[in-house]
Amino acid sequence: MSSSLLSPLFRRQLFTSLHKVPTRRAFQSTLSIMSEKLKPAARVAGRRQDVWSIINEAASASPIQPIVNMGQGFFGYNPPDFILSAAKSALDRVECNQYSPTKGRPRLLKALADAYSPFWGRQLDPNTEITVTTGANEGMLSAFMAFIEPGDEVIVFEPFFDQYISNIEMPGGKIVYVPMHPPKEGALKTLSAGEWTVDFDELEKAITPRTKMIVLNTPHNPVGKVFSRSELEKIAELCLKNQIIILSDEVYDRLYYTDFTRIATLSPEVEKITLTVGSAGKNFYATGWRVGWLIGPPELIQYVSAAHTRICYSSVSPLQEACAIGFEEADGHGFWEQCIADMTAKMERFTAVFDELGIPYSKPEGGYFVMANFNKVQLPEGYKFPKHVEERPRDFKLAWFLIQELGVAAIPPSEFYTDENAGIVEDYLRFAVCKPDNVLEDAKERLRGLKKYLKK
């Protein structure tokens, strides 16, 4: 029918029905439906402001600029020249700018096998017992994705590296926390980080038929503890008895100042249930390179490799090549011994200010973090904190105060505990000493400003 035969009124009604503008109520209803569909997943929703954004916010708002950043654990200096030269040379090679095999470049796998075989007391198979990942963090995510089903339980010691939590939650794991306890006299005198202890009765009670995995970190971040052989044997015994996979985060495995035992090397039986995590970023002063690896029996590694393939397929090719050369040449340069000597000197240089002020700390057995106890520091009465800091434990207030008044950033370790156990470390702050000596001296001079806030 021709439109000319339609009455003007009918044409108007037809046009209105075809081009109808939604009512306000209908529009709001549509928005409501859309907002429900656009809601984030529970695993990332509803999180309070994290420690990193709080500290960065405090740093940017501080009247003292620039801030001396003793908080985040990145190095304030470059890798050694032989490592940097290897990375630069790799960029000139065509194959080093293309995809690497998903399990890692053959040269790096061999270099890792050669480097770690002496600790294992046998030759590791680079093709079946090692997989390279995009940093240790992605390696641990791959391990959780490989073995954790919804409802499986994973035991984590407090304090924990915060990435463990989200990595376990991603595949639907349930986290069971077991706190480490600081020495009872930690507020009174400096003691070894080894004095932080695990209550093994608490650990055993945390194990249930759903326990699938336990996460161990040694040398430990943030405490600086190196688990003793006897402690590792107790953990291993419980895991063997209950068929629990051990995920041993050993990213600081070249920075230890006491006897260091790798749990996988306790026995062939323990080795069969252990995945060991390593990091080139920590080994070679290059945290931005994101090259890590896992070592373990073929029965476990094959599934970690499969998960890694689906997460990111392969890792950065030229930096893998540089890391391979790093391991090949490290001994010839005396690099590992120099690492320990340099970091020991930095620890002694920095902690001298706490000795001077009478502020006790946990003397690290490994890694590059120092936990200092600020119980003697009295915050001024009525000091104004932002609401999101006021609501957090005392260590957050201490960290905010240090940034605002002294221009020194440190990390409040209660972030690495559950709310239930946060009070255990509310007087502590974590300092990273992997900085140039002039930065350490600057931090020390600023921290001397605490003298007027010390309890008499």
Image (spheres, grey):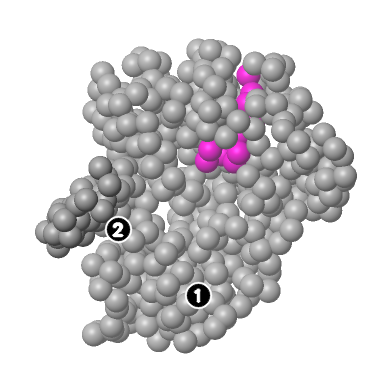
Is 65 located above or below residue 261 in the figure?
A: below
Residue under label 1: 408
Rendered position, 336 above or below 390: above
Q: Position of residue 403 (x, y in %)?
A: 45, 77
Magenta span contains residue 133: yes
Q: Is residue 299 above or below residue 164?
A: above
Marked residue nearer the N-terminal end (1 or 2)? 2
Relative to 398, 16 lies left or right: left
Check residue 189 in the rendering and tell me which mark sits there, or answer none: none
At 31% across and 36% down in the image, what residue appears? Answer: 175
Q: Position of residue 46 (x, y in %)?
A: 27, 53
Verify whether residue 260 appears in magenta. no
Residue 423 place in picture, x, y as percent: 26, 57
Q: Which residues are magenta?
A: 129-139
Q: Is residue 451 visible?
A: no
- Report the residue marked by disc 2: 48
Residue in the foreground of this view, choosing between 248 and 450? 248
